[in-house]
Image: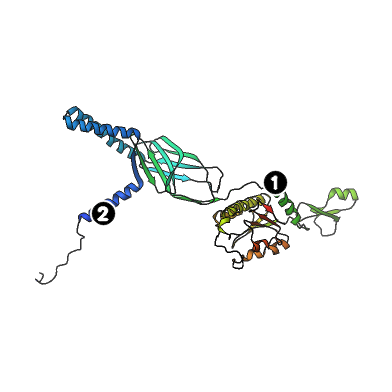
Amino acid sequence: MHRKDSPVYTPYASPFTPHRFLKRLRDFFRWFYRYRSIRLTSEGTRFVLLTLAVGVAAINTGNNLLYLLLAMLLSLIIVSGLLSEQCLKQLDIRRLLPEHLFANRPTTAAFSIANKKPRLPTFSLRVMDVVEDKAVDRGIHLLHLAPQASTLQPYPLLIGRRGPYRIEGIKLLTRFPFGLFIKAATLPLASEVVVYPELTPLPDRLSHDLTTLGHEQATPRRGPGVELSNLRGYQVGDDSRAIHWKTSARQSQLMLKETESEDQRRVTLALPTVMPPEQLQSFERAVTLTASLAAFFQERGYAIGLLLGDQEIQQGVGMGHLYTLLRALGLCQATSSFTPGPGSPPLPAGFHRLGERTAKGELTILVLPWADTCLTALTGDVSRTIRIDEGLREGP
């Protein structure tokens, strides 16, 4: 037995208060309406007004027939809400985006929609993307989707600017069954991709000059390859597979063919990222040109490197490497905190090494978004300088 003065311990239980109950109820409705919404259509507005008129008439007259009509109209509203909710439930939706996206280039994406309900179909379903908290209509209207069925709905996609592109979710809308209400559900299905800069054809004169410059920078030497370099007499120990039989027969002695080695042609693209705020539009044009130059040299088999501000990407070949360059260009941002004159920030070390690359026979191209004395001083050390602020004026 407990002593009279000994305390009796009981488990702590939070007291029930109306304030706490109302707070939980309010949080629930906030959560629910974050992903659900409903609004009247024009037909629904007229229907609700008719229902109110019948209700007022029934109360004023006490006519049982009007009460019966009012009950039927109210039941249609309730049935409409229940059936429309069933259309939005148990749907498995996935967004399929292309692996590589380019600014201002039309492409195709798709929605994979599966109805997981065992018995009930889905009717009159519209599917839209949510971008920057706004619903973007993709033109997808699914009239009927049977239970346990799935469909693939493609749609065109065009993104007007480079950089990160985020889709926050998917918005579903339905007018089923009577078209009185538009019920919407928002699904938090996020997708984020990097949009590469727009690729534009190079001007004919610039394309011709770069092709010529690339051949001038080539330094052929003897080695394994396919281009004929020289013919000489056969010596003991030479590879018999290199004998040029036609010339040997004509000169009545064994002649050996020597070939030029197939050296990988290399190019480095340089783009500064520090500039005044008023030159940001020129910077976007410079990014587009640099990306187009990378695609141009990729088609011609060059090993491509990139100097992007203080970021340097080593030279490489192949489409995978090109996409790495385009991704870096898609994500780069101009730094507008620039003060011309002696207080200007120093150039990254990679820009000062452009002259060394050019001296070794490598092709170096400097893309200038604007005229700067520090950058202009480098034009004599590189293979080619392209000025954006003066309409693609080419330097020496």
Residue 243: image x %, image y %? 82, 52
Rendered-image quadrant of the C terminus: bottom right
Rendered-image quadrant of the N terminus: bottom left
At numbered mark 2, what does the secondary structure look like: helix, strand or loop? helix
At numbered mark 1, what does the secondary structure look like: helix, strand or loop? helix
Query: Is 117 above or below relative to 347?
Result: above
The tag on residue 334 is none
- Residue type, mark 2 in image: Lys
| Mark before the other along the chain sequence, 2 or 1 | 2
Q: Residue 49 versus residue 75: which sits nearer the camera?
A: 49
Residue 280: image x %, image y %? 57, 55
Q: Residue 290 versus residue 239: which sits nearer the camera?
A: 290
Where does label 1 land, which residue? 204
Q: Label 2: how many residues lie within 10 Å, few (<14), some (14-19) or many (20+)?
A: few
Residue 168: image x %, image y %? 43, 49
Q: Residue at x 71, y 48 (%)?
A: 205
Q: Residue at x 17, y 67 (%)?
A: 9
- Residue type, mark 1 in image: Asp
Q: Nearer the viewer, mark 2 or mark 1?
A: 1
Tell me the distance, in whole angstroms, between the alpha carbons under discs 2 and 1. Answer: 69 Å
Query: Is 361 above or below relative to 38?
Result: below
The tag on residue 23 is 2
**Which residue sits furthest right?**
252
Side of 172 relative to 257 (left or right): left
